[in-house]
Amino acid sequence: MTRTAPARRRTPRRAAGGRAAAPRRAGPAVRRLARAARAGAAAVGTPRREVAIAAAAYGLYSLVRGLSGGRMEAGLRNARRVVRLEQALGIHVEPALQDVFTRRRLGMPAWSVFYVASQVVVLPLTLIDAYHRHRRDYAFVRNMALLSWGAGVGWYALQPTAPPRLARLGVDDAVSRHFIDLDHPLVRAFYNPVAAMPSLHVGMSPVVAWSLGRHAHPGVRALGVAYPALVSVCVVVTGNHFLLDIAGGLAVVLPAAAAARRLARPPGPTAGTPAAAAARTTG
């Protein structure tokens, strides 16, 4: 019976000078996957595809809501931390601001309707309008909304925060009083009650503002400039967000806008291909 020779143990190849050669970088498959993802972010798909993307984004929100939506104790604890930080900064004005709007009857019912409509009516209509009428800009608008939404949802998972109206600060729940009961079980099935930080109402408002400023009638473009400020006032006077939540919303959307602009540009040809050589020649 013949004996088989023992398997040779592979040793790393050595470069000049006796040092081990550096490991190979990510292979062509990884690069192709990255390019495909980049191309998908720059593309505008069929209505069914775009609806599926929106549904997936809301599914992510629902998943986080399911994981942290019942953590009211953690939400109240984080809300108290926000209050202490605002007090240290001298900007804890939410109860006083709401009191001024209520006593002087500065349209609290209208602000309450606007709080709901800005997120469930105005934002979807903005995306639909961009898809059907301004297709060249749709990828940027969609990507900015998705990136802002994703960053905000991740923040919710890490830091569930109760809004002022639930934080036992003497702040009234204006939306429930004037428009729709936010604590009704059917309503709560669709939103996260401890998702005050960051404010995605504010984080999404630049999506609407940019679209109005770029595509609306000149007489309406001023509304685009004012829209984020109106949303910021709305979320505070209705008792749904702290001032620092507004800062959190801006911290989410500004990097998202920069990334969305880059992602909306289709990737160039892969280096070493005929298309890349042609691009260098024409450039």
Image (cartoon, rainbow, N blue to C red):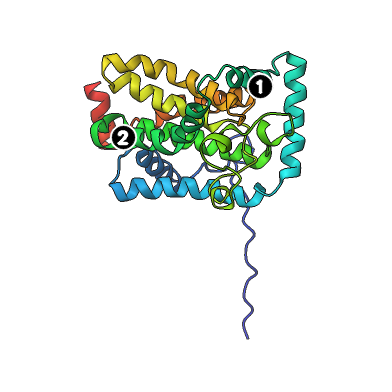
Closest to the observer: 99 or 151? 99
Using the numbered discs, state the Cα–Cα distance from disc 2 to disc 1 in whole angstroms.
52 Å
Residue at image position (67%, 18%) is 96
Q: Quadrant of the C terminus?
A: top left
Residue, disc 2: 269
**Residue 266's spot in the image, x, y percent?**
33, 33
**Residue 271's spot in the image, x, y percent?**
35, 34
User: Is residue 279 found left or right of 143 in the rendered image?
Assistant: left
**Residue 67's spot in the image, x, y percent?**
65, 51
| Helix, strand or loop for disc 1 | helix
Residue at image position (51%, 31%) is 112
Q: Give the class, few, some or many, for how many residues have Cα within 10 Å of label 1's Cα (few <14, many ≥20).
A: many
The image quarter in which residue 183 lies = top right
Please state which of the two labelled residues, at mark 2 or mark 1, is closer to the viewer: 1
Kindly check if marks 2 and 1 are in contact, taking CB atoms under 8 A apart as contact.
Answer: no
Residue, far bottom: 1
**Residue 19's spot in the image, x, y percent?**
64, 38
* Vertical side of 219 occupied by 162: above or below: below
The image quarter in which residue 100 lies = top right
Residue, disc 1: 94
Q: Give the class, few, some or many, for how many residues have Cα within 10 Å of label 2's Cα (few <14, many ≥20).
A: some
Q: Amino acid at mark 2?
A: Pro
User: Is residue 20 found left or right of 219 in the rendered image?
Assistant: right
Q: Quadrant of the N terminus?
A: bottom right
User: Is residue 71 found left or right of 243 in the rendered image?
Assistant: right
